[in-house]
Structures are given as C-alpha cells and as structure tokens.
Image (cartoon, helix red, strand yellow):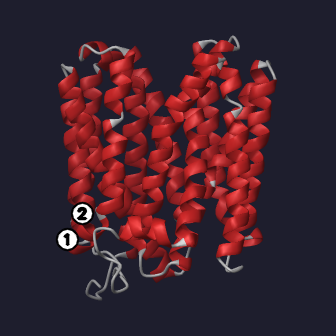
Amino acid sequence: MQQNRQWHHRGVLAMVFAVFVFFGFSIGANGVFWKDIMPAAGMGKALFGELSLISPLTAVFILLFGGPVIERIGKRIALSLGLAILTLATFVLSTVASPVHFGMVNLLYGLGYGIVEITVNSVTLDWERERGRSVMNYVHAVFCAGAVVASLIAGQLLQMRVAYAQILWGIGGIGAALALLNLMLRFPASVVEEGTSDAGAAFRLLRTNSVVFTLSMIGFFAAFAEGIAITWSVLHLSNLGASAVIGGFGFALFNTVMFVGRMTNASIVTRFGVVRSIMVSAIAIVVAGVLMSFTHSLWIAIAAFAILGFGAAGPIPTALTAGAKLVPGQNSAFSGALMSITYVSFIVCAPLIGNVAELTSLQTALITTIVVGVCLFGFAQRLHTVSHNAV
C-alpha cells in the first residue's frame, strides 16, 4: 500500500479527464491520417491492417501482466511514463517512412496505451473509493468527445493543406505537457490486498474469479459493439448510398450519442442498478442490429448507429466501477483484466465481420450485432447471479 498522504483530489480528477481527452484526440486524429500515412510508409491495406494489430496485442500483454510493475513504481510515475511513450509514438509517426517504421510506431502505441489504460482507470477507481462518488462514466464520456473534436479538426486542417506531420507534433506536444504536469500531482493511496500484486494477478482473476470474468465479458461485448461502429459504420452507410459527408455525420452521431449516454449512465445505474442498466444497453444493441441488418434505408441505418452508440456507452465504465466494489483492493489487477479483454474484442471484431462480409455481404455480417446484444444480456443476468444480488 502506498503511503497515506494528502493528495490533490481536484487536480487528479482534472488530470484523469485530460488524459481521456488526449486519448480521444490521439485516436480520432490518427483515424483521419491513415489514408495519407499508408502511402508514405509504402503500405497497402492488408499490410496496414496486419501491422496495426501490433498495438492492441502489445496493450493486452501490458494490461494482463503490467499491474504489479505499475503498483511498484507508483501510479503517478507510471501515468507520466505511459504518456511519454504515447508522445514519442506520436512524434515518430509523423516521420514514418516504411512498414518496419510503422510496426515500431505500433509497438510504442501498444506500450503507451497499455500503461495509460491500466493506470488511469485504476486511479479513477482509487479516486471514487476515497471520495465516495462515481465519475467513471463521465471520464469515459470525454474520450468520445475528444475523438469527435479531433477528427473534425484534423480533417479541416488537412483540407487547409496543413501537413499531418505538423498536426501530430501538436498532439505530441499536448501529451508531453500532460506527462510533465502529472508529475506535480499527489495521487490517492493505492490499497492492494496481500497476494494480489504479482505478475499473474490479472490473468488469475480472469481464470478464477467468476465476478471478474463476467464483468470482463460484459466489457468484451460492449467493446465489440463499439468496434462495429468504429470500423464499419461509414462503409455500411456508403453501401446504402451515403456521401462522404453523410457517412461522416453518421459516425459523428454515433460518438455524440455515446458521449451523452455516458454522461447520463451514472444516474441510470443509481436509479435502476448495474444489472438492469446493462440489460437496457443490451436491448438497445439488439434493436440497432435488427435495424441495420434487415432494412435498406440510409436514414434508418443512421438511426441504428445512434441507438448502437447508446447501447455501447454504459457497460464498460459501469463494469469498472462495479468491479471495484465487488473485488476490493485489486484495482490495478481488475482494471488490467477487464481492459485486456476489451482490447481482445477490438482485435477480433474487424477481421471477424470482414471475413463474414467477404463470404456474404456487410449487411449480413452486421447480424453479428444482434448476437453481441444477446450475449451482453446473458452476461448481465449472470452478473446478477454470481454477485449474489450485490449490484
């Protein structure tokens, strides 16, 4: 356990919000730049997709086994280290000139995302424990806002003929500033139960603790639903006749509804409980899947992605907060376990739907959304059982 000491609760919360915004900025802007970076690095779509897997695979490893190291060096130092690595990755990406170079960038991003994910979520849970307030939904909401704003700004700057390398240097500068500012803060004490801080703690929780496994699978299916929209929404809308502007509007609407959903989800959880809130999310995902899979109207499809945004918004932050209460004293290990499974979901989602679409059609492949919603509903029911009605 870290030494008890006075800590800066307002400063820590502000930093948590800033880190999630930076996350959104980084991912949202990079999504706009890939079409320019691929030719600069001499990559086709297939090689780009294969090398892009390095980042989430590295992050999964860090999330599963990095918790003890983070507890040992302290979350304040670990968060600044993760931000510094992400800053370095951003600077290196601005000069990418070959597939090998791009692979190294993805390795850096994987390390940075893994360290920051496990640390910032664990710090947020520590903050909630010490302050007696739930803020997880809100901090995850600003990630969505950051992604939308960054993609719009990046697109506008590119249209104004600003080089993507210059924009990346600006984003990297933000990351460097956050890494330095973070070192000036004092974090809440990290309460760690004895015997839960070894290298295999996160993996062991997944394997032996039914509550952690169930919450992690809730995270898996919620992330899968989110990944469907992130990867396939614009293409599906384009297949239905949408222009680039309308396709972008549909994706922006998805992220906007996710933002609103996360901002309001805490009150839904407070009123109806964890299990019922996740069940509502699951039903929304099923409805979205039915609309996008069995109708051919462009505007109904746009509405479906908005409903999908509502369904995908709440389960992950809700599961994180619920887990901190159901598995106390293991925030780093639990955060690593759940977030590693969400990263696995993102790894599986794109190729699975892509292969089904290749064999049939993208609209047929989107039936997967219905399956995801049904599975999420089932694990919500299982959570009610394994948690002994504690949520």
**At label 2, which amino acid type do we have?**
Ala
Q: Which mark is residue 78?
A: 2
Judging by the rendered image, the residue that carries numbered circle 1 is 73
Q: Dot 1 lies on which element?
A: helix
Name the residue at 76% across, 71% down. 271
- Picture quarter containing residue 75? bottom left
Quarter of the figure with residue 253: top right
Q: Amino acid at mark 1?
A: Ile
Residue drawn 28% across the image and 68% down it: 199
Depth order, front residue of 184/222? 222
Q: Residue at x 70, y 62 (%)?
A: 380
Q: Position of residue 236 (x, y in %)?
A: 64, 21
Query: Circle 2: is it few (<14), some (14-19), or many (20+) Cα within 10 Å?
Result: many
Q: Which mark is residue 47?
A: none
Q: Position of residue 71 (x, y in %)?
A: 27, 73
Vertically, is 284 above or below 356? below
Percent position of residue 139, x then y = 50, 58
